[in-house]
Image: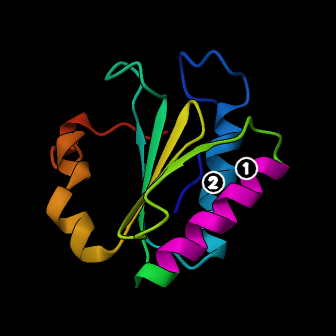
């Protein structure tokens, strides 16, 4: 997986690239699977980057999310908002300019966020 070399264009936060790299490293350290980073610049105002990953089970999804929360807090991020930690089918971590979705594989396939954000159309893909 290639990490973004510089901040995402248009971000009001100068270290957004560092946040993305930190999130990707945390996910890899937690053995998350099928990690995808999506540049949202110009597509929405909700965030500059979205990262999607899978865990093998509810327990694994929860552990990935817990580790990510600790890493983001250690990075000095304002307390990230989190949804879905009780069931751990789909956990959303909102770290401001970076949104992270951690799914069980079946749930990820059902919602197919990659398709919704255009990753099924190679001509529209842009690296972070």
| Residue annotated with mark 1 | 72
Q: Earlier in the sequence, mark 1 or mark 2?
A: 2
The disc label shown at residue 23, or none: 2
Relative image position of residue 120 (x, y in whole percent): 16, 49
User: Mark 2, residues whose alpha carbon is within 10 Å: few (<14), some, or many (≥20)?
Assistant: many
Q: Residue at x 65, y 37 (%)?
A: 17
For the record, the magenta segment spans 60-74
- Residue under the point 40% across and 70% down: 87
What residue is at 66 percent from the left and 74 percent from the top? Answer: 29
Q: Is residue 119 left or right of residue 13?
A: left
Q: Which residue lies most toward the front here?
A: 86
Q: Nearer the viewer, residue 5 or 38?
A: 38
Contact, mark 1 vs mark 2 (Cβ under 8 Å): yes
Residue 7 relative to residue 124: left or right: right
Residue 118 appears in view: yes
Secondary structure character of the magenta stretch overall? helix
User: Can you see residue 6?
Assistant: no
Task: Relative to 58, say whether 118 is above or below.
Answer: above
Compute the Cα span from label 1 to label 2. Answer: 8 Å
- The residue tagged with tag 1: helix, strand or loop? helix
């Amino acid at each position: 997986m290639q990490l973004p070399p510089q901040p995402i264009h248009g971000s009001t936060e100068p270290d957004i690239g560092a946040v993305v790299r930190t999130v990707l490293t945390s996910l890899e350290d937690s053995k998350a699977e099928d990690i995808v980073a999506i540049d949202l610049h110009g597509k929405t105002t909700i965030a500059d980057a979205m990262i999607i990953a899978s865990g093998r089970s509810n327990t694994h999804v929860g552990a990935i999310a817990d580790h990510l929360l600790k890493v983001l807090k250690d990075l000095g991020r304002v307390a990230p908002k989190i949804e879905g930690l009780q069931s751990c089918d789909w956990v959303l971590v909102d770290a401001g300019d970076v949104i992270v979705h951690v799914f069980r594989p079946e749930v990820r396939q059902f919602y197919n966020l990659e398709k919704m954000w255009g990753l099924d159309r190679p001509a529209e893909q842009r690296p972070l």
